[in-house]
Image (spheres, helix red, strand yellow):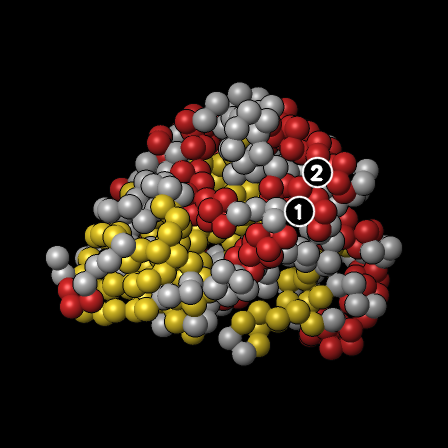
Amino acid sequence: MKYDVLLKNGRVIDPLTGLDGKYDVGIRHGKIAAVSPSLPAVDADSVIDVEGYIVMPGVIDTHVHVSSEARWIGFSMMASVGVITAVDFGGPIQDTVKGLATNGCGMNIAGLHTVTPGRNTKDADPGVEELSEITDRALAHGAIGLKIVGGHSPATPEATARIIDVANRKGCYVAFHVGSTRHGSDIEGLREAVELAGNNHLHIAHVNSYCRGLHRAPAAEALEAVDLLRSHRNLVSESYLGTINGTSAHIKDGLPTSHVTRNCLRMGGYTPDEKGMGEAILGGWAFIQVVRGGKMELVTGEEGFRIWKDAETKTGVSFPVNDTTSMHILAIAKMKDGDEFVVDAISTDGGAIPRNVQLERGAALVRLGALTWPELVRKLTLNPARMFGFEHKGALAEGFDGDVTVVCPVTGHAYLGISRGQVIMIDGVVVGKGGHLLAATPEGALKAKEAGLTSQAVDLTKSLFFTRT
């Protein structure tokens, strides 16, 4: 058999087949064609020696932000660190598709369409008819489902439950940044989210962000989150390992528009208003997001304050609010009766937010002995693929998509990224072009084609989201 790309002499880790050893991987016509202890180099158009590296299925980031034009830089930021497939949680889906077409770096992207009260709904209590129309439009434009932005722009608890129910009845995905007009983006909001989901299926976004110590010690909140997720397996979830968060610095009528931003200011001892925001930037607690040198950087102090003011406060901001102990608890916790992880995946909530560190920080957990490399690979590849119904991703078995990440086992530095058989990154340098949309409907696939993209169908009925109870 003739291979387009042949990776030789790497340590192949494939959680689906259980392989963990020295193998060669042959890719042909965008698919995994063979995995064997020895494949002849003469049978390949391109041979890459990856001895000393781990060869794993392409990393899948289950929660990123690359939707708005200001965040399209996130595609290259992800590709540069070995991410091959990602799910955008920013919306609207039309902007995600446009960004993928112009800045996609050869990546595979699925997108959720945000439901933001007062912005794309009439108010904080939208009814079933309005929500049904939003859902149908989102799916027709290429989304696989909805994202509820409760922590930033809360809806009423009743409306939040309606959104979850509408998505479940229509058979599409729905994720929740927890928080409503009754409870905030914290452990109390997580308890409420479990109640609002009822028996419906729901994705709990970035679980670690609800365990920042707003009510009890962060570790105690993380352990409560583990117990909640263990006892409610109709929920899927992810958590990330970055110490900073990402939110909006926008001020309206003297107050931050995002409720998350208000919480972060309080955590730093600042008043949750315009004055407090300015003081937090000058004092080094708030970091303004700005694009420089082809990536998003964080700037604080007088320079950050000036950038924020020049933008009329319409910038992104990050705060160092994530507790490392709670993050580690959530990353490694398992069910009591087996090897299944409580939190399904390690994400970044990154993309254009500079915290795309799932490989780097994950490798650190391996060095500490908290995870093994096969466990980390499972949380970065196979589990995410199953969560979203990406049937042909997350494994290096024959016939699966030719998505591969090659990584240094010591540092977690990604050396090579391959998407559907095409090299998109070499040693941090992004060379991929265009993109591939993962869509849930034929109408969504048509929108991808109109934008100049290829597409692939996602069968949500086979996803862990809908099949696990």
Q: Residues within 10 Å of mark 1 (few under 14, many from 20)?
A: many
Horizontal side, residue 51 vs residue 244: left or right: left
Q: Position of residue 29 (x, y in %)?
A: 19, 57
- Front-lying residue, 374 or 241: 374
User: Is residue 331 among what the camera can see?
Assistant: yes
Q: Are marks 1 and 2 in contact (CB under 8 Å)?
A: yes
The residue to which callout 2 is attached is 222
Report the residue that reaches farthest toward the left: 1
Q: Residue at x 59, y 60 (%)?
A: 355
Q: Quadrant of the N terminus?
A: bottom left
Report the residue that reaches farthest toward the top.
199
- Residue 327 image label: 1
Which of the labelled discs sits on residue 71, or is there none? none
Q: Secondary structure at mark 2?
A: helix
Q: CA distance from mark 1 to mark 2?
A: 8 Å
As rendered, which of 66 and 402 lies closer to the eye?
Answer: 402
Q: Is residue 116 left or right of residue 172?
A: right
Local secondary structure at mark 1: helix
Q: Amino acid at mark 1?
A: Met
Q: Position of residue 417 (x, y in %)?
A: 38, 63
